[in-house]
Amino acid sequence: MRLVLASNNAKKLAELRQLFAGLAIELVPQGDLGIGEADEPHHTFVENALAKARHAARAAGGAAIADDSGLCVRSLGGDPGVRSAVFAEGGSDATGDRESRRRAQDRANNALLLQHLAGRPAGAARTAYFACTLVALRHADDPEPLVTTGRWQGEVLGAPRGEGGFGYDPLMYIPALASSVAELPADIKNRHSHRALAAQAMRQLLAGVWQV
């Protein structure tokens, strides 16, 4: 079955395609269908994921899945949270292609997070977790969305480390793996991450409930 991904993030698409490999689904980014980004006005990951999935499902006239995820820093009251992707407002200029603008925004977001945590030592003040909520709909008015979540605990570094991943990956240190997320090979990240945990649970629902 075709499952429209309510995102135009190429790296997120690549991760989810790997995480859903083996299922009888074709994951298609909404941009390939000319579907624009949905508004994300809500204060929770699940509400934003549901809004994005409904938007994509309605525009595509079929099934859709959305990921809403972000970094939550305990000493910042859970920020940047649902605003993780646009934490530094205006961080991306209007030049370049979509991925160039996204990388610029990522750099601005990381710099702002470091400013907020400046002077705070390693330990409790820098404890954080990545959160991911996945929502899948058979159609825009599906009364029973499939909803899964995942969390990945870590600590915010004092400076970026590593060249891989995207978003806050260079700043997120995972003690259990003795590495920043950006230093991890893709296959290791896709076994341990917040998105991997949510996707594992979603695979079970897609197979058991939708019988995919």
Image (cartoon, grey):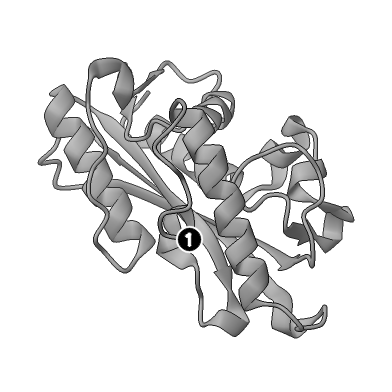
Residue depicted at 68% across the width and 49% down the height = 169
SS assignment at label 1: loop
Closer-to-camera residue (52/149): 52
Query: Amino acid type of disc 1?
Result: Ala
Image quadrant in which you'd find residue 52: top left
- Residue 31 point in image, percent of width and height: 31, 23
Side of 124 relative to 83 (left or right): right
Quadrant where the N terminus is found in the figure: top left
Where is residue 60 drawn, in percent x and y? 17, 23
Whether residue 190 sits left or right of residue 100 in the image: it is right
Residue 142 percent coordinates (x, y)? 15, 41
Relative to 158, is 190 above or below? above
- In which quadrant of the rendered image does the C terminus lie? top left
Q: Residues within 10 Å of mark 1 (few under 14, many from 20)?
A: some
Residue under numbered circle 1: 88
- Residue at image location 18% in from the left, 39% down from the top: 55
Residue at image point 63% right, 61% down: 111
Against 32, residue 142 (above or below) is below
Residue 136 position (above or below residue 29): below
